[in-house]
Amino acid sequence: MAEPQREWFEKDFYKVLGVAENASDKDITKAYRKLARELHPDKNPGDTAAEERFKEVSAAYDVVGDEAKRKRYDEVRRLGPMAGGFGGGGSGPGGFNVGFDDLSDLLGGFFGRGGDGNPPGFRSAQQRPQRGADLEADLALDFEDAVNGIETTIHLNDGDGPRDIKARIPPGVTTGKKIRLKGRGSPGRLGGPPGDLFIKVTVRDHHLFGRAGNDLTLEVPITFAEATLGADISVPTLDAGPVKMRIPPGTSSGKTFRLRGKGGLGDLLVTAVVAVPEELSDEQKAAVEAFAAASDDSPRTHLGV
């Protein structure tokens, strides 16, 4: 795998993520998630620079975020490019470029051809390296993990036996999203490359929050008094705990407020819903009747009735 190792030597993935070479796995994951949220294409539509930076960050984390790859990467960086066995195709004696077909023809002239038309000892097309099959796996994610991203393990049990595959799920995935893990499918045959693994994501519902693109949504009940007079209330967020927000006087049921930066990759859209009590005490009923008697305006005037 000369090309990936050459890239490893030439690129400082730690610098790309903004962490030290001796950073812990936890710090590397934390740095990646922060950058992924800031640079995600859905949050930066039309920004090609942010998209390229997002790809660069993802590629860096794909290496140093994986324990085995990180160990190999550090070794390549320590020993230099020749540690990876870099090198191109060879030439024949005297500078002649000799390909497989040329060599096959040459040897065939000397030794004759087998029953498959190839010189003895040479493989037929069916015997040449074959790429492994692609695989699919289903993955159900909790709402929080889909919003924030997560590292998880995929359990496979195909024709090659049971095995576990570590997968990094990027922030912001939605139900139906397919994630490709290159080279994690079935092994190739006769030295061929492995296939790919495609993970199909299903996101479980949250008991409080919904999603609208990159934004999170939340319905918050408010009292008649809060809607009429205004109030400062606390609302939950997915990651940051409760935050304060202002309900202005005269808020109608169904009005939506935007809390910027409080909704994962986007904002938190809070919809106020005026809660009507099913039962009133005598004192409450008298207060409502007094309010009604003092009110001259009808909310149905525009209907002409």
Image: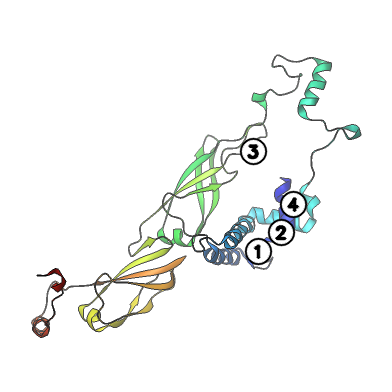
Badge 3 marks a residue whose secondary structure is loop
Which residue is at 89% across, 35% downward? 95
Badge 2 marks a residue whose secondary structure is loop
Q: Which mark is residue 16?
A: 1
* Badge 2 or badge 3: first in the primary sequence: 2
User: Viewed as shown, does residue 11 lie left or right of 92?
Assistant: left
Marks 4 and 3, how far apart in space?
Answer: 19 Å
Q: Nearer the viewer, residue 41 or 64?
A: 41
Type of amino acid under label 2: Lys
User: Viewed as shown, does residue 184 lie left or right of 293?
Assistant: right
The quadrant in which residue 48 appears is: bottom right
Residue at label 2? 11
Badge 1 marks a residue whose secondary structure is helix
Q: Which mark is residue 6?
A: 4
Residue mark closest to the camera, 2 vs 3:
2
Residue at label 3? 193
Residue contact at pointers 4 and 3, CB within 8 angstroms: no
